Amino acid sequence: MGGTMKVKVLEVRLVNGDKPLKAFVDILIDDTIIREFRVIKHNGKRFLVAAPQCSWKAPDGSIQYKTLITLPDEAKGLVDLEVLRAFNLELEKTNAERSK
């Protein structure tokens, strides 16, 4: 990839509840849409951005996961920054609406 990569958040879908999964986020990297990035927060830790993944049930009954896309470090850093920025804005907006 030449030049600077453009990352734009298309949609943030907050997830209610006390589970680690906090949101699903769809993004646009240059001209490519990637859906279902996840914002996760484990107890006492910082928010983190996880790439889309698929899951399936193995023959032994356990749930297996596979990451669908792996970004280079520089791209991952930019995606994380934009996703968390948009997530925080959506969270603030939702909290403001609830407190009315």
Image (cartoon, helix red, strand yellow):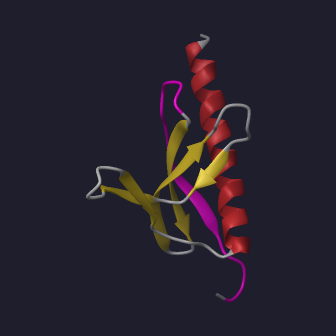
Please indicate whether residue 81 sits to the left or right of residue 37 in the image.
Answer: right
Which part of the image, by quadrant, shows the C terminus? top right
Report the residue at 73% width, 41% height from top.
46
Of residues 25 and 10, the one drawn nearer to the viewer in this rendering:
25
Give residue 17's position: percent from left, percent from top. Answer: 49, 24
Residue at figure coordinates x 48%, y 73% from the top left: 32
Q: Which of 51 and 62 is in front in this view?
A: 62
Task: Indicate whether residue 31 is drawn in magenta.
Answer: no
Residue at the outermost front position: 60
Residue 77 falls left or right of residue 60: right
Measured from the top left, where is residue 30 in percent x and y?
57, 74
Residue 15 image point, x, y percent:
48, 33
Please state the extent of the stretch shown in magenta in the rendering. 2-19
Q: Which residue lies furthest to the top in this view?
A: 100
Q: Is residue 17 magenta?
A: yes
Query: What is the quadrant of the N terminus in the image?
Result: bottom right
Q: Which image quadrant for residue 57?
A: bottom left
Q: Residue 37 location, x and y as percent? A: 51, 55
Residue at position x 52%, y 40% in the image:
23
Q: Using the image, determine if residue 31 lies above or below residue 45.
A: below
